Amino acid sequence: MKRHIITLLIMQILIVAHASAENMQMVCKHSFQGNYSGGDVLLKYVENSASVDKAYVKGKSSWVQICTDVETYGPIIISDLKASCSIFLPNWMNQRRKNFIWDFENKELHMQTLWRIVNPETNKKEWQWSYSVGVIGSKNWKVFHVWESEGVRYEKRKCK
């Protein structure tokens, strides 16, 4: 009798967990490597109240947990309908990485490229990113370089 009750409880837990998992999908334009390239990339967020949320990218033959198929810097964070990670760029772009934030709630992709160089103020290698203001090549065009420790501003793309 005890086994039947335990079995029924386990089945109820599995049914509730399955019912509480919700999927959200979006398509974002990527220009990166591997599963994150080729224009339109299909992404999926699985919200699960009985367990941890997960995010996936559609590979050639199956869904791959986001950022687990590439070399990353720092943690992969998946929470509150957002997934984020920082991915090292291919060897020919040494000392560079790209931060990604996939916002499934607002259907947006936020990204920024950073490179590792010596900070003349600390004389240590640190991560830096840049942005520009004005029309490229004009007299008013200015490029600003910012250290990651001072914060990062992301380029934003809308997804479908």
Image: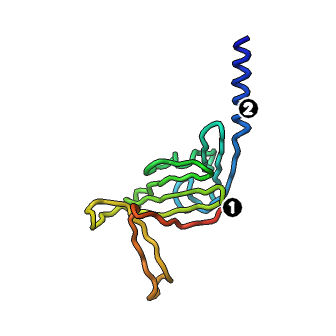
Label 1: how many Cα within 10 Å (few below 14, some 14–19, many 20+)? few
Residue at 58% from the left image edge and 48% from the top image edge:
79
Residue 75 percent across, percent down from the top left:
47, 48
Q: In which quadrant will I find the C terminus?
A: bottom right
Which of the labelled discs sits on residue 15, or is there none? 2
Q: In which quadrant will I find the N terminus?
A: top right
- Contact (Cβ within 8 Å) of mark 2 with mark 1: no
Q: Amino acid at mark 1?
A: Lys
Horizontally, residue 14 falls left or right of residue 150, namely right
Q: Mark 1 — residue?
A: 160
Residue 37 percent across, percent down from the top left:
56, 58
Of residues 122 and 159, the one drawn nearer to the viewer in this rendering: 122
Q: How many marks?
A: 2
Q: Amino acid at mark 2?
A: Ile
Horizontally, residue 78 falls left or right of residue 20, namely left
Residue at 41% from the left image edge and 60% from the top image edge:
96
Residue at 68% from the left image edge and 52% from the top image edge:
25
Instruction: Classify 85 as above or below 7.
Output: below
Question: Residue 2 falls in which quadrant of the image?
Answer: top right
Which of the labelled discs sits on residue 126, or is there none? none
Residue 143 percent across, percent down from the top left:
42, 77
Residue 112 percent across, percent down from the top left:
49, 63
Label 2: how many Cα within 10 Å (few below 14, some 14–19, many 20+)? few
Instruction: Classify 126 as above or below 9.
Output: below
Instruction: Classify 66 as above or below 103.
Output: above
Which one is earlier in the sequence, the residue at label 2 or at label 1? Answer: 2
**Helix, strand, or loop for circle 2?**
helix
Q: Nearer the viewer, mark 2 or mark 1?
A: 2
- Colouring method of the image: rainbow
Horizontally, residue 137 falls left or right of residue 79, namely left
